Image: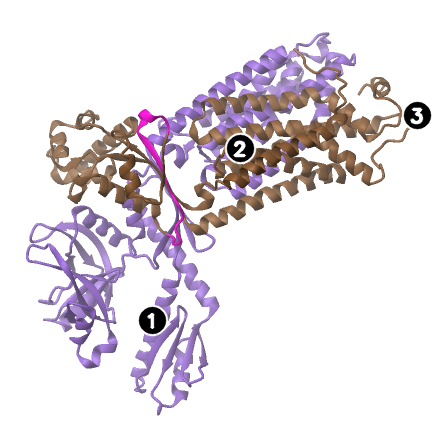
Chain colours: A purple, B brown
Amino acid sequence: MNRNVTWKVVLILAILVVFIVAIVPTASNPEPIKRGLDLKGGTHLVMRVNVGDAVRLETDQAAETLKAQAAKLNLPTLTTHRIDDATFVATGPQAASNGDYEKLGKDTLGQFDMSRTQDGALQFKMKSLYQTQVERDTITHAVETIRNRVDALGVTEPIIAPESGNRIVIQLPGVDDPARVKDIIKTTAVLQFRIVEGEGNDAAAALASVPANMKNDVDVLPETRENELGQAVGTSYVAVRKTVPVTGTDLKTARPQKGQLGQPVVGFSFTTEGGKKFAELTGNNKGRQLAIVLDNKVVSAPRIEERIENEGIIRGQFTQQQVSDLALILRSGSLPASLTTLEERTVGPSLGRDSIRQGVTASMIGFIALIVAVLLYYRGAGVNAVLALLLNLVILLGMMAYFKATLTLPGIAGIILTLGMAIDSNVLVFERIREELREGKTVRASIEQGFARAFGTIIDTHMTTIISALFLFQFGTGPIKGFAVTLLIGLFASVFTAFFVSRVIFDVMYKPEDRPATISI
Amino acid sequence: MQIFVNTKYDFVKWRFAAVAFSLFWMLIGAAFYFKNGMNWGIDFAGGANIVLKFKDKVPMDRLRADLADASIQQYGKPEENSVLIRLPQLKREGDYAGATVAKLNKDLNPESADANKIDLNFHGRDRISDLLAAADPDAKGTNDDAKKHYLGIAQNIINKRSELGLFTSMSQVSSAPGVTAADAKVLGEKTFLGQFNVLNQETVGPQVGKELQQKAVLAIIFSTLAMGLYLWIRFDLMFGVAAIVCIVHDVLVSMAFLFMIRGEFSLNIVAALLLIVGYSINDTVVTYDRVRENRRKLKVGMTLEEQLNLAMNQTLSRTILTSGSVVIVLIALILFGGKVIHEFAWILLIGVLAGTYSTVTIVPAVAIAWNAMTGRTHDVKGPAARPRIEESEEPRKRKAV
């Protein structure tokens, strides 16, 4: 055999081996080609992060800072109110000098633009660059928190990725209880410890019980009331101080426990820093009630009996499952903003099983039909085409394994469709060879000419399909993307197999030095 | 075996009849469209889709009473006891399908009133494992190994459920590998078998649906234009235009078919249409490539009509065979591929057939019209006044094309 051809054969065999290795399952890699959610079962979620929440919080904190600083400088008390997520207005007493407040605003709130309203109050608007920064940080933080929670749930190979438009795409393969997982992901879990100033059966009564000088400094939050047995009997309202000395970020860990009545509770312990803050809070407020606030609801408001440093429990109307989920959520930290579900697709495992079976059956039948048709039509050259086709299939699957592409149901259809299209290249070459033969050329000359003349055409036909596959990839989500990827890989592979491989097979079967007189085509 | 060797069909002659036929087909499609409107799938219309599998016969009346706005239909064969619930779009974003499923689970299963009882047909592995670990029937203690032990059992139970579709009796649960008699006893007390299992649930909010509609339309338009541009660069403007008309034709013919079968316009259909845009043009490229090749070698004058006829006859076998290979595959997908890809495969099939048809009818029609409008610049003027196609075979042979 010609040395040149020998090398090509070796190259093809090497490629064959490399890709076969990639797709043979091993003990360490039992699933070389990952199945997509539509085949494996699982949940695909698109959530919007309501970044406005975080911006609002930042604005509120700025207003609090301004007030606190004013108090430190012994300036008359400011009143503030927020007019939108990023803007608040501060009004001082008429008599006070505005110059002092302006100076204070400039010094303390560098991230805000200050202006004067028509009635002489100061308006602070968050700088847009800073707002963008806050929003971006919020998304990053949300992604991290969600990842912590999903990891704690033990989901294997989740995908959690930010997307444009303040969105996060979450893919959870193999999840069999989507309701619970969604709850866990979506709970903001903002845990706060706040001093109670008053209580009542409705919000107005709760506010009425607050000392007069504190009325502006409290929030009224709902609480589920319980009897001695720990059963829910209604809702009451609790007025708690606006200042939040200790929060969920001060927790070191949280775990499910049994309470005194044997009911499920969440036990937690503080970080060193958090422990100090909590000790100070409890030490200074002995005898008062401390509200444990979760997502703006009071879960319980026990009386402070003594200074507490290290740990405590959260008691409330919880089932066993809720307690273990709450502990998990507290361990993973709170979300910086609430989430809204924009899109959900959940496929149960049994549907995925059906889909695979049908998809694979249909593809096998299509593949066999294709092979039979090609062999019938092209005889000897058909064998060549079938070999090229098989190599194409191996390369396609191998590339998917190497690129860690996921196999989706449309992807399975895509594989077999790609093979149907890959044959086109062989058809173009073979028909051209036949044409050359009809014109009386020798076998070798016809092969040479057939490949040479079909080349441009095949490149063009592939390019058009590749262009549309790229549009498909750009457009599609999930399963459709999988389809586009299979198609693209298959198209590139088919240029290689139809030209290079098929040509080498002809070169081996009909060697130039043999001067072949006939060809089976 | 060989087909269509040395044919001499006068394709160009049929172009008007073909254009009329295509328009007729599209008109029927349009009539269906105006009668029934666009059947947007959930991806575009928004809303929720839920597929449930029931233990016994589907309680249709109960579901209809419970979900007033929903369209409810049987899913698959009647003996599969499955149902597809389609809920219209809400104005607000939210977990629509999840909330509906939770409501149905509560309404249809009186047992679910007890919050401490678990529905083995509804809940997942972790809940079952937590329940078992709390009761600890196998006396494993509370260490990590015990957790692992019960997690394994729970996984086996879920696997068993996936295999069966759903549990219809507790004995099926106990037959899952690893479930001991003690486990079965705990499960018998603390769990129940709900009426249904969720095979599939989807929610698409109003925002995502609207965006996808836009993206789909833009993707189809831009890919068509990109195709025209590519072929303009590779060939000439006339062909670029003809290709765009051809693609639009193929897409419209496929869409008309979708309207006729009252199919749902889903993401899969968009995928099929995009594929049609890229693939159905292929045999046109093959044909036009040949026109160009012939033109370079022509020693005699030839009108565009004659050039097209010659090329189409020369490449006819290719046109038929390349589409044929894909058609074989598509038929297999239609017959055996299952519900999810059924309509996708049908639309592709129609698109591929339309692509072959338009190659020999619509493309020449556009090219000839273009040529006439631009002062017949695409004719090849040779020494002979009006040579015939047969005569042109001679120089080809001598030149050993």
On-image quarter of the C terminus of chain A: top right
Disc 2 marks a residue whose amino acid type is Met
Residue A291 in the image, given as x and y percentages of width and height: 18, 65
Q: Which mark is residue B260?
A: 2
The x, y position of residue B309, in whole percent, is 77, 25
- Numbered tag placed on residue B376 in the rendering: none
Q: Nearer the viewer, mark 3 or mark 1?
A: 3
Disc number at residue A61? Answer: 1
Lower position in the chain sequence, tag 2 or tag 3: 2
Q: Are marks 2 and 3 in contact (CB under 8 Å)?
A: no
Q: What x and y, as percent, mark residue A245? A: 23, 69
Residue at point 33%, 71% (across, down): A61
Marks 2 & 1, CB-CB < 8 Å contact: no
Q: CA distance from mark 2 to mark 1?
A: 61 Å
Direction from residue A405 to residue A81 in the image, left or right: left
Q: Which residue is mark 3?
A: B384
> Is the N terminus of chain A in the top left, top right, bottom left or bottom right quadrant?
top right
Q: Which of the two discs, 2 and 3, sits closer to the camera?
A: 2
Q: Nearer the viewer, residue A127 or B346?
A: B346
Residue at left 45%, top 43%?
B43
Question: From which residue to which does the magenta span run?
Answer: B76-93
Is A504 one of the magenta-colored residues?
no
Q: Quadrant of residue A386?
A: top right
- CA separation, marks 3 and 1? 91 Å
Q: Is residue B5 left or right of residue A419?
A: right
Mark-to-mark CA distance, 2 and 3: 51 Å
Is A70 on the left-hand or right-hand side of B382?
Answer: left
Q: Amino acid at mark 1?
A: Gln
Q: How many marks?
A: 3
Towards the viewer: B372 or B260: B260
